[in-house]
Image: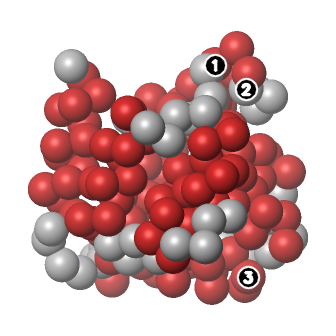
Amino acid sequence: MARLLHLARRFFGSLRPGGPSAESQRWAESLLGPDERTIWCALSGPDRRHSVGVARRVQLDLGARATRSVLAAALLHDCGKLKSRLRTPGRVGATILGATIVRTSEDVNGWSSSTSSWKRSVGRYRDHPEGGAKMLTEAGSDPLTVAWAREHHLPSSQWTVDPVVAEALHSADDD
């Protein structure tokens, strides 16, 4: 039930146009390297607002432990969604398909390599953690930032990130 409420909040929040405030935009950009900043700025306005909210909650929760790489992880954890090129309606469809049809890694791989552009987009959306990790590796991001992009939808037993940091990131993201 909590997951459905979270998804409903994210959906309605994504309908509001525009990105974060100018102050939040400057704050986020100050935490990112040049290539990371390019990736983050390519995110949709709602995705940037979401990521700033996650990063602010992580900063409050961790205090001094919220290093630049931890906050970059919060800001960039969903960057792999860029590869799907899906907007809100397509993401809703991909989420529903993920709960019903495109569930296994084999399903995701098959859809990601489909000749159908829509199926390929759904597959890439479902595989956004791995896609984001690849993008961040190419951008020269810190290993922690890359790891969290890859692991943020995995069960906690599979996290390699420091458990205190990972739990703060997970709790702040609420998905």
The residue where tag 2 is placed is: 159
- Front in this rendered view, residue 154 or 62: 154
The answer to which quarter of the image holds residue 6 is top left
Quarter of the figure that contains the N terminus: top left
Label tally: 3
Residue 94: image x %, image y %? 38, 53
Q: Pointer 1 and pointer 2: residues touching (CB < 8 Å)? A: yes
- Front in this rendered view, residue 161 or 124: 124
The residue where tag 1 is placed is: 156
Q: Amino acid at mark 1?
A: Ser
Specify which label sits upstream in the sequence, 1 or 3. 3
Between disc 1 and disc 3, the foreground one is: 1
Label 2 crowd (10 A; few <14 / some 14-19 / many >=20): some
Tag 3 secondary structure: helix
Q: Pointer 3 and pointer 2: residues touching (CB < 8 Å)? A: no
State the CA–CA distance, disc 3 to disc 2.
25 Å
Q: Which mark is residue 35?
A: 3
